[in-house]
Image: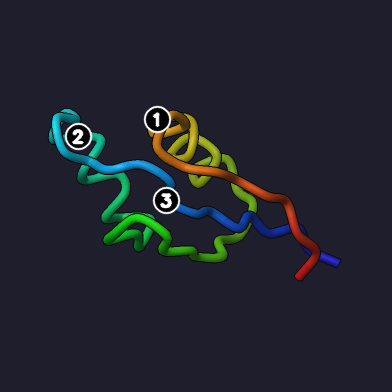
Amino acid sequence: MAKSLKVTQTKSVISEKQNQRDTLRSLGLKRIGDSVVREDTRANRGYVRAVAHLVEVEEIDA
């Protein structure tokens, strides 16, 4: 079974840098409480690490 990441936005992007806003948008997150499931790749881990203070991450089996 492949691993996946469930990413949930927990904080607002107001007062955050533009590149962090863009990273959340590229993950598919638009507002607080939104969740997306992404494949567990190095690129997606990097995206999550860049905005770790704004999101909550869970590893799931998909």
Name the secondary structure under disc 3. strand
- Residue type highlighted by circle 3: Gln
Q: Is residue 24 left or right of residue 14?
A: right
Q: Residues within 10 Å of mark 2 (few under 14, many from 20)?
A: few
- Position of the C terminus, as image quadrant, is bottom right
**Relative to 21, does residue 50 appear above or below in the rendering?**
above
Name the secondary structure under disc 1. helix
**Relative to 46, does residue 39 appear above or below in the rendering?**
below
Q: Which residue is mark 1?
A: 50
Q: Is residue 8 left or right of residue 14?
A: right
What residue lies at 86% left-to-right and 67% top-to-bottom? 1
* Closer to the eye: label 3 or 2: 3
Q: Which residue is mark 3?
A: 9
Q: Position of residue 5 (x, y in %)?
A: 63, 54
What residue lies at 40% left-to-right and 37% top-to-bottom? 54
Mark found first going from the N terminus, 1 or 2:
2
Q: Which residue is mark 2?
A: 19
Q: Residues within 10 Å of mark 1 (few under 14, many from 20)?
A: some
Q: Is residue 8 left or right of residue 58?
A: left
What residue lies at 27% left-to-right and 61% top-to-bottom? 30
Residue found at the far bottom of this picture: 62
Report if the CB atoms under discs 3 and 1 are less than 8 Å apart: no
Q: Residues within 10 Å of mark 3 (few under 14, many from 20)?
A: many
Report if the CB atoms under discs 1 and 2 are less than 8 Å apart: yes
